[in-house]
Image (tube, rainbow, N blue to C red):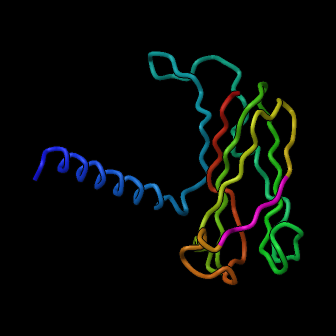
Amino acid sequence: MHTHFKRAAAAACGLIAALALTSCSGSAPATTSDAAPRKASGAPAATKEAPAASADVRIVKSGVEDHPTWGPGAYVVHYEITNHSTVAAGYFAQIEFLDADKDVLGTTGITADKLGAGKTSTGDTAPLDVEIRNGKMTDIRSVRVSEVDRTAS
């Protein structure tokens, strides 16, 4: 086997493994990218900390409805993202679609770019068929926000 082919094959295997691990994040609890700055000693620095980003994303309502964008009988999630920090920020939030047993059927992501401090962005989303990997669209009974990343912009 040629050296270039071996390297390409090894890189492809590594990428596939990384993607497999990434897609297994299913039902992890909500996380944020906001961490308090730390001193060299490991203790939190004495700075005023912004509220946790997970508190910035809220599901307003969700359920089956006839929607002008998502179509008739779509499972639609209405949400709002409010920037409670003191600077403009970009957001990514992951939404999990759950069955009656609270098992994760699939996920989708929502974003807000350059959202000013104190400002709110509202929207709605619906899962695509390809995002529901562990059941059927008709199995969806509820949703939850499983991850929120806030980045100063």
Q: Is residue 127 magenta?
A: yes
**In the image, residue 40 lies at what x, y percent?**
45, 16
Residue name at image x 65 percent, y 46 percent:
148
**In the image, residue 89 lies at what x, y percent?**
73, 32
**In the image, residue 6 lies at what x, y percent?**
17, 50
Q: Which of 123 and 56 is in front in this view?
A: 123
Locate residue 73 relative to residue 149 in the image: left or right.
right
Q: Nearer the viewer, residue 110 or 62?
A: 110
Answer above or below: position of 45 versus 11. above
Q: In which quarter of the image is residue 134?
A: bottom right
Q: Quadrant of residue 138?
A: bottom right
Answer above or below: position of 26 versus 73. above
Q: What stretch is highlighted in magenta?
A: 123-128
Answer above or below: position of 142 versus 33. below
Residue name at image x 81 percent, y 56 percent:
79
Q: Quadrant of residue 91?
A: top right
Answer above or below: position of 88 versus 147. above
Locate residue 43 relative to residue 33 in the image: left or right.
left
Residue name at image x 79 percent, y 64 percent:
77
Number of marks in picture: 0
Quarter of the figure with the C terminus: top right
Locate residue 63 relative to residue 13 in the image: left or right.
right
**In the image, residue 47 lies at what x, y percent?**
66, 18
Q: Does the magenta stretch include residue 126?
A: yes
